[in-house]
Image (tube, helix red, strand yellow):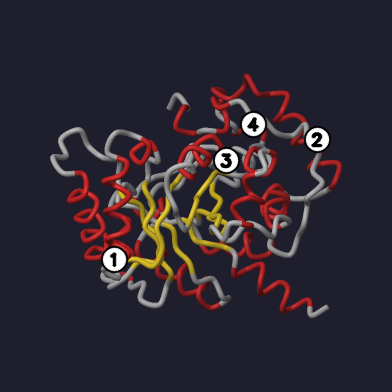
């Protein structure tokens, strides 16, 4: 086996999550928004090791504008259309104008992927019109692929019953294994649909020392205790276990990882060498109040 080639392939599956570049993001974030100079350094280092994909969104503060000023030509950029506002008169126009604005802010001619930030927009009364607008954006050459960001497997099932898409972005982590357990990870792969996974650290909860986990998550203390004890027993860093767990699934196309500093990026790169597919099943949950951050009480 060419170990160097294998590691290079693993690293290339990392996708830089950019929410922290546009706002203070993450329930355990203690550093706030990443500054432009640090953004530039992170992207240069990432590109230098073979990472080629960025995940962003119009809803991430001024993230797209920051990336546009830093320069992201040559990157595969995936962005997301914001949730459809009630005031939108024409949903198709809203989608196409949203994509145009993203391209202008990013200062690039074409996105790798355009996702709907809220898949319920596709499942609502305007779903067909919104889907046709995504297809039109792809036809115009504004993006190569279209897709959705989902909260869980039930969203995937509902979308694919009605629409043909290219990319699904879903949460997946040691703590949230629904994507694999449901069988959807394998089904998406077999259907030729790219799977991008996010929240592999559960917004930092899986990385936080016991004393620093927010008290609002104490109702899942048994899970945290099991996780902490397993890490101690195996003598492994939490970031290594989190990345290694997801890396063990070859069906995952891109692993979205938020990065706040060069040090964090280097820790992520080091973790790419690990594989932990056999972390005990009981270190997980299907409680939506935990695994769906949109339900968290901030």
The quarter holding residue 106 reads bottom left
- Residue at position x 57%, y 40% in the image: 202
Judged by depth in the image, the label closer to the viewer, 1 or 4, is 1
Decide: few, some or many residues near mark 3? Use Cα within 10 Å; few <14, some 14-19, many ≥20. many
Given contact means CB atoms under 8 Å apart, are the residues at marks 4 and 3 in contact? Answer: no
Query: Is 298 displayed left or right of 70 in the figure?
Result: right
Identify the residue under disc 3: 202
Q: Do the residues labelled 4 and 2 touch (CB within 8 Å)?
A: no
Discs 3/2, front: 3
Quadrant in which the N terminus is drawn: bottom right
Which residue sits furthest top? Answer: 219
Q: Which mark is residue 106?
A: 1
Label 3 to label 2, Cα distance in Å? 18 Å
Residue 79 picture location, percent across and down: 37, 57
Q: Is 174 placed above or below 103 here?
A: above
Spatial distance from mark 4 to mark 2, Cα to Cα? 14 Å
- The picture places residue 286, in percent across and down from the top left corner, at 64, 29
Label 1 secondary element: helix
Q: Which of 214 and 106 is in front in this view?
A: 106
Looking at the rendering, which quadrant does residue 218 occupy?
Answer: top right
**The C terminus is located in which quarter?**
top left
């Amino acid at each position: 086996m060419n170990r160097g080639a294998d590691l290079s392939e693993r690293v290339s599956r990392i996708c830089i999550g950019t929410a922290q570049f546009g706002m203070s993001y993450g329930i355990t974030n203690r550093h706030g928004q990443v500054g432009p100079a640090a953004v530039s350094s992170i992207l240069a280092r990432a590109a230098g090791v073979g990472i080629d994909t960025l995940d962003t969104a119009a809803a991430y503060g001024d993230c797209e504008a920051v990336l546009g000023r830093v320069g992201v030509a040559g990157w595969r950029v995936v962005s997301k259309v914001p949730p459809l506002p009630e005031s939108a008169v024409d949903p198709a126009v809203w989608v196409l104008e949203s994509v145009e604005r993203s391209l202008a802010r990013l200062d690039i001619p074409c996105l790798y992927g355009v996702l709907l930030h809220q898949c319920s927009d596709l499942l609502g009364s305007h779903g067909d019109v919104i889907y046709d607008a995504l297809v039109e954006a792809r036809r115009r050459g504004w993006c190569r692929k279209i897709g959705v960001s989902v909260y869980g497997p039930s969203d995937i099932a509902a979308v694919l019953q009605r629409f043909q898409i290219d990319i699904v972005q879903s949460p997946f982590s040691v703590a949230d294994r629904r994507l694999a357990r449901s069988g959807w990870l394998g089904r998406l792969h077999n259907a030729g649909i790219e799977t991008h996974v996010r929240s592999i650290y559960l917004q930092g909860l899986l990385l936080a020392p016991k004393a620093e986990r927010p008290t609002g998550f104490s109702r899942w203390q048994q899970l945290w205790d099991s996780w902490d004890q397993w890490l101690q027993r195996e003598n492994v860093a939490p970031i290594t276990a989190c990345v290694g767990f997801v890396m063990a699934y070859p069906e995952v196309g891109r692993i979205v990882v938020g990065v706040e500093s060069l040090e964090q990026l280097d820790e992520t790169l080091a973790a790419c060498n690990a594989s932990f597919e056999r972390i005990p099943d009981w270190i997980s949950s299907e409680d939506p109040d935990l695994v769906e951050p949109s339900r968290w009480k901030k």
